[in-house]
Each structure stands twice: as C-alpha cells, then as structure tokens.
Amino acid sequence: MNATNKYANLMFDNMMSKADTHVHTFYSGTTGYGPLRFPESITSPEQQVDNARKNGMSVVCITDHSEIKGALKAAEYGKRFDDIDVVVGDEIMTADGEIIGLWLNEFIKPEMTAEETMDEIRSQGGIAIAPHPFSFYVRCLRDKVFELDLDGIETINGGHPDPWTNATAQKVWEQNPGRWAQISGSDAHSPITSNYNWTEFPGQGEEDFRKAILGKTTVACGVPAPEFTQVQWSLQVVTSGQMYILKAMAGKLDPEDPNPLAQKAMKISTPKKVAGLIGGAIYCFPPVPFIGEYLATHWLKKQAKMLQQKYEEDHDLAGQCLTQSIR
C-alpha cells in the first residue's frame, strides 16, 4: 500500500459523520388536545430524505409513531443516492412508554409491554433506543431504562427545549458509563425543526453507524430546536391541513392517493371539516400562535423548575438519612 492510500485510509478511519436518528413523516398520524385534532407531520418520506441530504447527514432514521410505512418508502427512495443511507425505524408506543426500534423489517404492534417490544425488535435484528427518556409531558420510559437491554438513550431530543428532560438524560448517561450509546435525535416532524442537533459517529453510512451504537462510540451534538421553529411548524401543519380539507370539500383529492392526510380529509364529516377550517383560521390569526407558544414555554420552564427542586429535596433528604445512619 503506497503512502497516499495509507493517508486516505487514515483520514477515513478518523472521519466523523452525522446521523439523525429520530425523524417523522405524515405517516405519524394525528394528535390533538380535547376536540382539536391535527397532523403530527405534513412532510413526506421523500422530503425528509432530501432534507437530511441537504443538512449533510450520512444516515437518516425514519421513525414514525407506531408505523413503518413511511420508513419503507423513504428507504426505497434513498436507494437512488450515494451520499445517504436510510434506516427503517419506528417510534413504538409501549405500555411503559415509547421505544425507538431501528433496522426493522416489519411492523411492531403498539401497546405491548416494553419487554415484549424489545423482544420483537431483537427478533428482527434491530437496535433499541429510548427517546426523550425523562420527558414530563410525553409518554416515555423514565426509570424503566434501567430494567431494559437498551442500546442507547437520547441525551438530546430536539423537540424538548425545556431545561429538565435532556439535562436529566445526560446526567443519567454520565452516571452509567459504557451502558448506553449517547444519542441525539431531532424528533423533527418538519424540516423546519431539523439540523439543530444530530449524532456523530466514526466512519460513514449505516453499517459504521450501527457499529458505533453497539460500540458506544457515538457523540450527541447540537441543541434542541428553538421555540420559534415550533410556531413555524404548527402554522405549517394547520395551514396545510386546511388546504387538504378545502380540496376534499371541492372534490379535488384523489381517492387512490396513499397520502394518509388526504385519506383522513376525505373521510371526516362535513361539520368536522367546517369546524377544522374555523378553528385553524382562529389559530393562525396573529398573535394567537405566539401567545400559545409563550404560554407553553412558560409552563415547560415552570414544570422543569418544580422537578429540579423536588430532585434536589429528595437527594438532600437521602443524604441526611445516610449521615444519620452513619452516626
């Protein structure tokens, strides 16, 4: 081997690449608060792959909510590109909180126990990640992470800007060296909220990324997406949803369209369509979305502060008990 090839191999061995391990498409379904329902994402699998390429990702993992149809479509689309690998994943809702399965081949039924879900992931040769493991407003594993044979935990989740969730996960990861790979996933439901955080790993492509997770050599990078991007995303979701409703009412949607948002818009009743248009118009009228985001941010910070105070009080009490027992 000549000196040039040796240098090239050394550079490749030391190269760090970027992966986004937690990305959603419009196959993630809908969610809501009370009577209000809205799509989790209006972004297609192909758009998320294109966006990941634009952001310089070597690997992107499509992880819709308890669904792999979008990931399979993204993986098929990604085959035409040499600069990115698409991993089929699923953010599976278990009875104990969400678990991300990566490198899956088949759909995994939601709402099983965490242990049963882990068995299903392993049976497919998959890797298991705990997303936002210490969130206080999303169903997550919390202390269940200590009972499961997880490969990694998210120490940075891009959808959690609060000062508790990621900080707690980072602290737990540091207190258990070598137990889990350190993961940073955007949790992006739209390109708007992506590229603020990612996972770095040595090498390039999905095989090197898989080795890095199993070898615990990944590095969590970046910060959660800023609050203003959440406003942009919510406005995008609402306005796009209204367009689907209007097209459905005008009979301009194709009944054979596989897009689940189009199918949803065609199935809901006319009164619900009208209510959706009115509610969406109210939400998009300034300054309503900005007031909503301010109130949500204020609530998150308040809850995080309360949790931190409780954590400090509990540990202070434990320390006092230990001191008394020594005496």
Image (cartoon, rainbow, N blue to C red):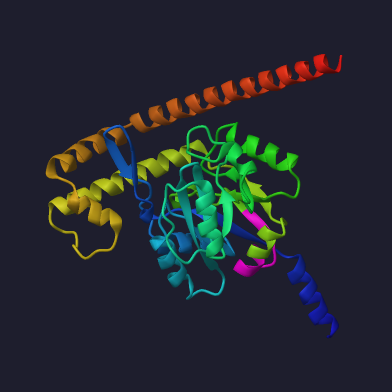
- Drawn side of residue 8 relative to residue 82, left or right: right
Q: Quadrant of residue 270?
A: top left
- Drawn side of residue 13 relative to residue 86, left or right: right
Q: Is residue 208 above or below residue 168?
A: below
- Between residue 155 and residue 6, name the one nearer to us: 155
Q: Quadrant of residue 260?
A: bottom left
* Residue appearing at x 71%, y 22% in the figure: 315
Location of the C terminus by quadrant is top right
* Residue appearing at x 56%, y 56% in the figure: 20
Q: Is residue 320 above or below residue 92?
A: above
- Between residue 147 and residue 231, name the one nearer to us: 147
Location of the N terminus by quadrant is bottom right
- Drawn side of residue 24 relative to residue 279, left or right: right
Q: Is residue 276 above or below residue 327?
A: below
Q: Position of residue 17 (x, y in %)?
A: 66, 62
Residue occupying the far bottom of the picture: 1
* Residue appearing at x 47%, y 67% in the figure: 105
- Between residue 179 and residue 224, name the one nearer to us: 179
Which stretch did the figure color magenta? 199-209
